[in-house]
Image (cartoon, rainbow, N blue to C red):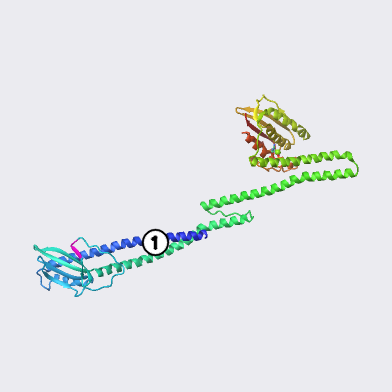
């Protein structure tokens, strides 16, 4: 069942429950008010009757009180009126010959006797009678007024007024219920529409159209959800582009050494056919270089997968960072001098030995120094060590291409490379963007970190900090 239908059902159930409670409350208060009105009216009749009896005592048949006495029986619910003296002798009486028989009312309202006067229920000819009497005094003599009410007519009157109010109430309730239903439909539409839009957007993005976005029309929870959804779609698109870049760069990185090896072997074949064996070693040297690149590439990929699965282990030994830096600098000297750059290790104060995995730390230094040489075309690269309380640091400062401020946070992500605009850095194209990711992971596993300061066109400074 759709959310909309569930909401509609829920709200209808709520409306019905509220209507039922309102109807019960209304019925209860209406019953109480009708019953109390009837009681008041009956008391008034009894009081009036007492007055009439008092006035009629000793008056003649034409007196005003006597005429008034006669009018009592015109009220349909009164079956008998009488006045008696202190000895119980009736001096005035009027009654219906037979109390009217009525069918039992459909809605039965219990009648509670009032406090004023004496009230009792009796049966006359099978009809229920509510009998009320009240004493009054005239010139020191007791006079008793007596009124018989037909309870069936009382009930009928009460029931008919209850039925009328109930009919009015049910009309109002029906209108309110209809308005509630209309409101329910509108509310569910308003609430569910954004959810449907989102479901549709999820379907479209799921089908691969990653450019689809949801319009954000409000600032409420739905608006927030829509903008979160759009941000998620942006990230998905980014990942998709990264994946595409990654596949194309990996294919390229794999293909270029393989193509190189293919070319070399073709050339070697030609030399063999022409019996020019002297030229073969040079080609074999190229093959070795291509194989070396391929090997490095596969090693880096394996390294990344080890880091990500948490399986990279360190072989911790005593290590001296100064020795390590000196060794790494020397291994890049030739490469730097072919580019006409001055790469030097500046010897400072002696730094004490520390603990770490020498091979891994050498890997970190080799990547940072290798990057410095790769991205510097003129000037110099200076490597030196520093000590700070609790830390040993190696700084690699170059005068190379520099890194734009907004890219600094990205260069440690795997497969991330900044593509230099010109052609001055051909070797930059050969990297895979894994070196710094691996270096950072190794430094972090030693409890250290790598920080960068850089200025585009002026150079960069990488600081590797390790706990002393
Ligand atoms: N010293 C530097 N000067 C300028 N840019 C740098 C420097 N070091 C790193 N970068 C930028 O950071 C990117 C990521 O460096 P990283 O070492 O991870 O990859 P790479 O050197 O391109 O490839 P790999 O190390 O996998 O062979 C580089 O592609 C480069 O754009
Ligand atoms: Mg690198």
Residue 26 highlighted magenta (yes or no): no
| Secondary structure, magenta segment, majority class | strand
Q: Identify which residue, 308 or 81, lies in the foreground.
A: 308
Residue 87: image location, x then y, percent: 9, 66
Residue 367: image location, x then y, percent: 70, 36
Whether residue 48 can be seen here: yes
Q: In the visual, does 216 lie left or right of 261? A: left
Q: Identify which residue, 384 or 218, lies in the foreground.
A: 384
Magenta stretch, residue numbers:
116-120
Number of numbered discs present? 1
Among the 4 quarters of the image, the one containing residue 88: bottom left
Location of the C terminus by quadrant is top right
Residue 358: image location, x then y, percent: 68, 31
Residue 205: image location, x then y, percent: 62, 55
- Element type where label 1 sits in the image: helix
Among the 4 quarters of the image, the one containing residue 271: top right
Ligand 1 closer than 8 Å to the CB at disc 1?
no
Whether residue 426 can be seen here: no
């Amino acid at each position: 069942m759709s959310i909309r239908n569930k909401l509609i059902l829920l709200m209808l159930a709520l409306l019905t429950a509220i209507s039922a409670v309102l109807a019960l409350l209304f019925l209860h208060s209406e019953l109480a008010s009708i019953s109390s009105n009837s009681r008041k009216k009956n008391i008034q009749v009894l009081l009036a009757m007492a007055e009439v009896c008092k006035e009629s005592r000793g008056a003649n048949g034409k007196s005003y009180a006597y005429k008034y006495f006669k009018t009592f029986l015109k009220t349909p619910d009164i079956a008998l009126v009488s006045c008696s003296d202190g000895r119980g002798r009736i001096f005035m009486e009027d009654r219906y010959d037979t109390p009217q028989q009525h069918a039992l009312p459909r809605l039965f309202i219990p009648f509670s006797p009032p406090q004023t006067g004496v009230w009792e229920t009796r049966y006359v000819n099978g009809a229920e009678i509510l009998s009320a009497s009240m004493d009054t005094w005239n010139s020191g003599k007791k006079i008793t007024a007596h009124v018989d009410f037909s309870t069936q007519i009382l009930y009928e009157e009460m029931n008919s007024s209850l039925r009328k109010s109930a009919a009015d109430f049910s009309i109002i309730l029906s209108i309110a219920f209809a308005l509630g239903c209309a409101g329910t439909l509108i509310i569910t539409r308003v609430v569910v529409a954004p959810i449907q839009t989102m479901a549709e957007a999820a379907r479209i993005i799921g089908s691969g159209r990653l450019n689809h976005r949801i319009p954000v029309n409000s600032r409420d929870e739905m608006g927030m959800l829509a903008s979160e959804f759009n941000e998620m779609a942006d990230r998905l698109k980014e990942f998709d582009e990264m994946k595409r870049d990654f596949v194309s760069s990996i294919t390229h990185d794999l293909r270029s050494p393989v193509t190189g090896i293919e070319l070399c072997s073709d050339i070697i074949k030609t030399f063999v056919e022409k019996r020019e064996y002297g030229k073969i070693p040079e080609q074999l040297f190229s093959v070795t270089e291509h194989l070396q690149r391929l090997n490095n590439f596969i090693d880096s990929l394996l390294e990344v997968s080890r880091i990500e699965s948490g399986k990279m282990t360190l072989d911790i030994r005593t290590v001296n960072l100064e020795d390590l830096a000196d060794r790494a600098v020397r291994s890049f000297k030739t490469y730097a001098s072919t580019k006409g750059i001055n790469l030097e290790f500046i010897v400072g104060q002696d730094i004490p030995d520390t603990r770490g995995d020498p091979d891994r730390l050498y890997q970190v230094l080799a990547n940072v120094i290798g990057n410095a040489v790769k991205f510097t075309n003129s000037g110099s690269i200076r490597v030196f060590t520093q000590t700070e309380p609790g830390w040993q640091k190696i700084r690699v400062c170059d005068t190379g291409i520099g890194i734009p401020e907004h890219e600094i946070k990205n260069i440690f992500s795997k497969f991330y490379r900044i593509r230099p605009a010109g052609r001055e850095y051909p070797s930059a194209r050969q990297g895979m963007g894994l070196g710094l990711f691996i270096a950072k992971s190794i430094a972090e596993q030693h409890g250290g970190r790598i920080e960068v300061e850089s200025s585009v066109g002026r150079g960069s400074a990488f600081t590797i900090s390790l706990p002393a």
